Image: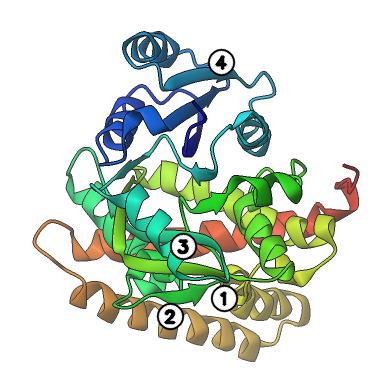
Amino acid sequence: MKPEVSVVIPCYNEVRYIKDCIDSLLSNGTDPSHMELLVIDGGSTDGTLALLNELSQRYPQVKVLNNPDRITPRALNIGVHAAQGTYMLISSAHASFDYGYIGTLISAMSQYADAIGVGGVMETKVKNSTAMSESIRTVLMHPVGVGNAKFRTGVSDVIAVDTVPFGLYRAQELKAVGGYDERLIRNHDMELSKRLLRNGGKIYLTPMARCTYYARETFRAMAKNNFNNGKWNLKTVYITRTFSSLSLRHFIPMLFLGSWTLPLLLSLITWNPWWSLASIGALSAYTGVLTAVSWRARNGKNKVLMVLLGFKLLHFSYGLGSLIGLLSLPFTSRKI
């Protein structure tokens, strides 16, 4: 029998997370016999494959596919092209889903005639609660950290947005646009959303469906992830040849970085102390605002200084990544 929903899950070394993800999907309220879970593994070496094989033997819905290229958009396309369902849910091995998530999205897709995609609000959590991980969680849920990403900060009503995490789509529409752009190591999800929107229709975010994403739990891991995200901002624009592939919020960290590094550079070149003062002023104002925000965001689990450091690391690593991405454009191929 053809499944109603195909869930596509890219995976690599996710032994800590993948079982919770699969369990939350199979117990979501949708009849498991109407589902298929396509886990596309990139050759995990941490025990993930053994766990997946065990789960696939226990649950016939779980199918393990191979991604020898170990590239996320390639894994997603393997799943997109293999999917047999009427609907397709894009997941992450780091995600788990509240009860009714799938059914709520299917209902919303039917309710809104112009919907080409529907997603739910994402709550950021951590597996291990420490002062550092809770501070990172605070940063990744705050508008100062993630901008106007409504799926992270929350909504009270159904609204149209530019992208959603772990969205539900009609499988034939994803297949018709060719799936994900495999040239984009990062930002492939946003680029696909913008491409779908250009073809007509809307993407909706509903507060009635909720999911969880488990964040990285160290400053080093967070900074590395955001550096790579930022690095692919301008590379995405360059490869796709359109600024509409991304949104304004993706470029703000690089603009912030330039607001104090450029005056500092000019002071070194011109030996004009006023440029140094401009740089110091920009940094001081920025730190003052972030200190106030960090103080207001304290919740008994995080630490004000760690939240402040988390904001700065996120902005700096993302902005630096964007700058490195800009400098690497002459060496970036547009070839498909």
Q: Residue 271's x, y, as percent?
A: 72, 82
Indicate which disc, 3 or 1, sits on the residue closer to the N terminus.
3
Spatial distance from mark 1 to mark 2, Cα to Cα?
A: 9 Å
Where is mark 4, residue-wise?
43
Instruction: Say how the picture is coloured.
Output: rainbow
Spatial distance from mark 3 to mark 1, Cα to Cα?
A: 42 Å
Q: Please tell me which residue is depicted at 30% across the width and 45% down the height of the picture.
A: 97
Q: Does the image show residue 20? A: yes
Label 1–label 2 contact, CB within 8 A: yes
Report which quarter residue 216 is drawn in: top left
Where is mark 2, residue-wise?
286
Indicate which disc, 1 or 2, sits on the residue closer to the N terminus.
1
Residue in the foreground of this view, choosing between 283 and 179: 179
Report which quarter residue 129 is drawn in: top left
Label drawn at residue 256? 1
Q: Tell me the amino acid under the disc marked 4.
A: Gly
Q: Tell me the amino acid under the disc marked 3.
A: Ser
Spatial distance from mark 2 to mark 3, Cα to Cα?
A: 45 Å
Indicate which disc, 2 or 3, sits on the residue closer to the N terminus.
3
Q: Residue 321's x, y, as percent?
A: 63, 55
Q: Tell me the amino acid under the disc marked 1.
A: Phe
Indicate which disc, 2 or 4, sits on the residue closer to the N terminus.
4
Query: Going by the image, does 308 lie left or right of 89?
Result: left
Where is mark 3, residue-wise?
110
How many residues crowd around disc 3 within 10 Å: few (fewer than 14), some, or many (20 or more)? Answer: few
Query: Going by the image, does 37 lie left or right of 127?
Result: right
Q: Please tell me which residue is depicted at 33% across the width and 30% down the height of the picture.
A: 32
Q: Residue 161's x, y, as percent?
A: 51, 73
Residue in the foreground of this view, choosing between 24 and 224: 24
Spatial distance from mark 2 to mark 4, Cα to Cα?
A: 43 Å
How many residues crowd around disc 2 within 10 Å: few (fewer than 14), some, or many (20 or more)? Answer: some
Q: Residue 169's x, y, as percent?
A: 55, 52
